[in-house]
Image (cartoon, helix red, strand yellow):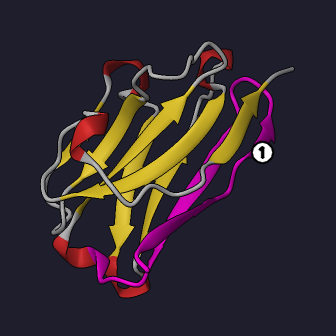
Amino acid sequence: QSQFVESGGGLVQPGGSLRLSCTASGFTLDRYAVGWFRQGPGWRPGAERQGVACINGGGDYISYADPVKGRFTIVRDNAKNTVYLQMDSLLTDDTAIYYCASSLSCALSQSRFGSWGPGTQVIVSS
């Protein structure tokens, strides 16, 4: 069964950092783009999750959503079948459940991704 498992979430103060991990099992990750998405407190069923960052299979194409540019960094380690999201200078608006998923190409659109993990909670609060 192909699936992802996210980890690394937690409670952090504004301005702090976290590193999220997304590890794939049941398939080889290096053929796929991987995206990070988030679902904030205001999310309602049926609404799109917000795309955060995406990296292609080779790691040579990366895309970030405007709200996280300059603060978040996505990297992948295909040898470990894992993609990381380094989050720095965190804001309260970054509070969300963070998910990863795979796609054949990189685009910050939820509908193009599959094999979603269960998510990891990030809370940014003082």
Q: Hey, which quadrant is residue 50 in on the image?
A: top left
- Does residue 88 sit above or below 40 in this rendering? below
Residue 27 sits inside the magenta stretch: yes
Q: Hey, which quadrant is residue 90 in on the image?
A: top right
Quadrant of image for the C terminus:
top right
Residue at x 41% of width, y 45% of height: 36
**Residue that label 1 marks:** 10
Q: Nearer the viewer, residue 86 or 48?
A: 48
Q: Point out residue 98 in the picture as x, y percentages from the top left corner.
A: 56, 42
**Would you say residue 87 is visible in this rendering?**
no
**Would you say residue 75 is visible in this rendering?**
yes
Q: Point out residue 115 in the picture as x, y percentages from the top left corner.
A: 38, 61
Side (left or right) of 12 relative to 82: right
Residue 45 sits inside the magenta stretch: no
Q: Nearer the viewer, residue 113 or 88?
A: 113
Amino acid at the residue labelled 1: Gly
- Does residue 1 sit above or below 20 in this rendering? below
Q: Nearer the viewer, residue 96 or 69?
A: 96
Magenta range is 1-29
Q: Point out residue 44 in the picture as x, y percentages from the top left corner.
A: 56, 17
- Give SS at disc 1: strand
Residue at x 43% of width, y 83% of height: 80
- Does residue 18 sit above or below 102 in this rendering? above
Residue at x 29% of width, y 83% of height: 28
Residue at x 28% of width, y 46% of height: 54
Seen as rendered, the residue at the extreme front is 46
Q: Point out residue 84 in the picture as x, y percentages from the top left corner.
A: 47, 59
Side (left or right) of 28 relative to 25: left
Seen as rendered, the residue at the extreme top is 42
